[in-house]
Amino acid sequence: MKSFSCFAFLAAAMMCSSVSCGSRPVSTDSVTAEADVHNTMTNDEIISAVTGNWETVSELVDGKDIMTDIKSYTFHDNGNGGYFDPEGVPHQIGWSIGEGGTIQIFYVETEQLSGRYTLTGDEMVITEQDGDKVCETHLKKVAEFSNKNIKES
């Protein structure tokens, strides 16, 4: 009798689960997801990873590549650095480590502060909302700049 009641309970449970599996699909149109990326690296590891030369490898707007000019940066381990315009003219920048290990750039001449770049693998990536468009810029560390107009000091 005990095995029969156990079997009956098991059969009822299976029936209930199979009935719920056949229900209609639920729309995910109004579902949004947001992720806060937190780097697990120490500040010294981040400084070591960031120090060096970087260039844009892609600039995307709503997933479409719109990159026209390569932007070049050099980051020093003391928080200083340089941004080189397409003609190779250097401009002073500062950089700092922010929340969750993100990187923020300060353009000295224009007194502008960038959004927060996230270290992901061998790239620094920034994603920003511009009205109804999503803009994403990817920087990659390089041994030497591809822009031959840049004269490193």
Image: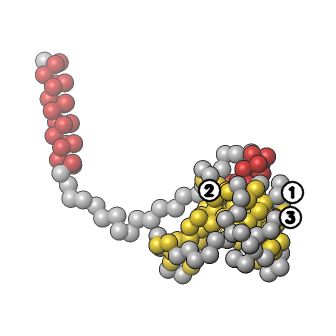
For badge 2, the amino acid type reads Glu
| Image coords of residue 37 (percent x, y) | 60, 55
Relative to 43, 26 lies left or right: left
Residue of label 1: 78
Q: Report, in whole angstroms, how far the alpha carbon at label 2 lies from the one at label 3.
A: 24 Å
In the image, what residue occupies the spot 21% across and 42% down? 17
What element does badge 3 sit on? loop
Q: Quadrant of residue 89?
A: bottom right
Q: Earlier in the sequence, mark 3 or mark 1?
A: 1
For badge 1, the amino acid type reads Asn
Residue of label 2: 123
Q: Earlier in the sequence, mark 2 or mark 3?
A: 2
For badge 3, the amino acid type reads Ser
- Which part of the image, by quadrant, shows the C terminus? bottom right
Residue of label 3: 153
Pick whichever, 149 or 100, lies toward us: 149
Q: Report, in whole angstroms, how far the alpha carbon at label 1 lies from the one at label 2.
A: 20 Å
Crowding around mark 2 (Cα neighbors within 10 Å: few <14, some 14 to 19, many 20+) is many
| Image coords of residue 58 (percent x, y) | 56, 67
What element does badge 1 sit on? loop
| Image coords of residue 120 (percent x, y) | 60, 53
Q: Quadrant of residue 93?
A: bottom right
- Which part of the image, by quadrant, shows the N terminus? top left
Residue 113 visible in image: no
